[in-house]
Amino acid sequence: MAKSKTAFVCGECGAEFPRWQGQCSECKEWNTVTEIRLAPATAVSRNSRFVGYAGTQDNKVQTLDEVALTELPRINSGFTELDRVLGGGMVAGSAILIGGSPGAGKSTLLLQVMCGLASRMKTLYVTGEESLQQVAMRAQRLGLPRDQLRMLSETSVEQICHVAREEKPAVVVIDSIQVMHVAEVQSAPGSVSQVREAAAQLTRFAKQQGVIMLMVGHVTKDGALAGPKVLEHCIDCSIMLDGASDSRFRMLRSHKNRFGAVNELGVFAMTETGLKEVSNPSAIFLSRGEEQTTGSVVMIIWEGTRPLLVELQALVDYSQLGNPRRVTVGLEQNRLSMLLAVLHRHGGLQMADQDVFVNVVGGVRVEDTSADLALLLALVSSFRDKPLPQELVVFGEVGLSGEIRPVPSGQERLMEAAKHGFTRAIVPWANRPKQSPPGMEVIAVKKLEEALEAL
């Protein structure tokens, strides 16, 4: 009997080591290295035919001009926001990972998608965490058709692939990848080796059979996808469904997509009948009161392929502490500290003894640098206790020397603001339009001082 081999793998990043150590030298995390058993290597004959990871049977070398450039057909999921995040729809033979915190609505969204697709094609929903009765009760509560969606309660990857070969579905849902296990790997389900091998086998099966594989993944307490990083490398698309527990809105964002653009944003609303699409998210994030308030301004950010109007709020107050607080919700805290230094150096406003609180209304996570100018104007408005006009929108990146840098798609941002009734805009000089939108006054600035004087 062959002796089983062991390896030591980090549970956070998937790095392997020859022996146990307290700290992972790759991700610098402590007490994450665990011992796993490796499956014995199977003997392969010299004349046997290897099958590639993508499932191709023809392994000959080709040049790029010999490759057939046929457009991949896409399958409509029934949700416009989901198709937007996926790059236009689901591609046959692709492996898609949907992550999110508990209660975000991952299983609800996939159940709605699968019940809609079951009337057009053959589908298979594999549940490993819930019983079939629980899934049926959810479908009944949401008012979904239950007569055509085929269900399977199984956690063995080998059995799932066997059933899928017999059923021949076009779309398969695995809920979730953390509870699946491979018989050859001698470790508990949910471990690094089990998650890695289960995802690899399901991805290989999807590419060989041309099946769309939708896998549900959990997240850690830090909000990162649970499992090793190789899980994100072997799949084709990784999307995250985020949403605060006290908010009914859910943000679907793409982090990796081999068949489309990344950083696309889809907005859903959680209702009693499931997730509903929000076709005009700017109207929701702009639910402002009629009374003018200090420190509030509307900015135009760019998410994926569309502009988005979001309200930004800032509160500047005298600090009783020796080290004033800098709190941001929806923005990067280090960027706030940098912009406060720019405001002191080039705007002449000292906030070293002030507590600064910044919030992006609606729970949106803003990573676009075009929010710099709007953030500075909101800080000045709160510091001076002077409200900004309700019909004002702002966008622009601020450099360390106080210059206002241009941002992409300036004309599209202005058109979106004009569509929602805004009549005044402060934009970078390089983004000034040749012809302003009807009824809108566009103020183009080059320096931070010019923007402050325009208030």
Image (cartoon, rainbow, N blue to C red):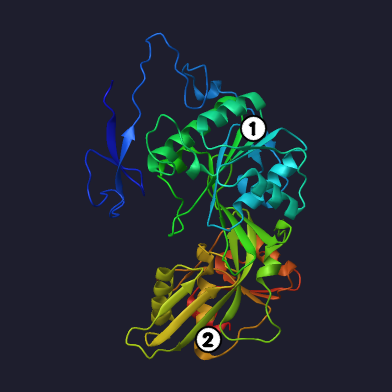
Lateral position of residue 420 relative to residue 242, left or right: right
Lateral position of residue 46 relative to residue 116, left or right: left
- Asked whether 424 or 383 is in front, the reply is 383
Quadrant position of the N terminus in the picture:
top left
Residue 313, numbered label = none
Q: Mark 1 points at which residue?
A: 72
* Residue 226 shows in the view: yes
Which secondary structure, mark 1? loop
- Which sits earlier in the primary sequence, circle 2 or circle 1? 1
Residue at 69%, 82% in the rendered image: 289
The amino acid at mark 2 is: Ser
Residue at 74%, 51% in the rendered image: 140
Q: Where is residue 90 in the image (x, y as percent from the top left)?
A: 64, 39
**Cβ atoms at labels 2 and 1 below 8 Å apart:** no
Seen as rendered, the residue at the extreme top is 47
Residue at 40%, 74% in the rendered image: 337
Bin the neighbour count of mark 2 within 10 Å (Cα to Cα): few under 14, some 14-19, many 20 and up.
Answer: many
Task: In the rendered view, tell whether residue 278 sits above or below residue 421.
Answer: above
Which secondary structure, mark 2? helix
Q: Disc 2 versus disc 1: distance between alpha carbons?
A: 52 Å
Q: Where is residue 225 in the image (x, y as percent from the top left)?
A: 46, 51
Bin the neighbour count of mark 1 within 10 Å (Cα to Cα): few under 14, some 14-19, many 20 and up.
Answer: few
Q: Position of residue 266 (x, y in %)?
A: 63, 55
* Residue 348 shows in the view: no
The amino acid at mark 1 is: Leu
Task: In the rendered view, tell whether residue 45 sits above or below residue 438.
Answer: above
- Asked whether 136 or 303 is in front, the reply is 136
Q: Where is residue 139 in the image (x, y as percent from the top left)?
A: 72, 49
- Asked whether 52 or 116 is in front, the reply is 116
Q: Name the residue under label 2.
A: 382
- Asked whether 437 or 255 is in front, the reply is 255
Residue at 53%, 86% in the rendered image: 382
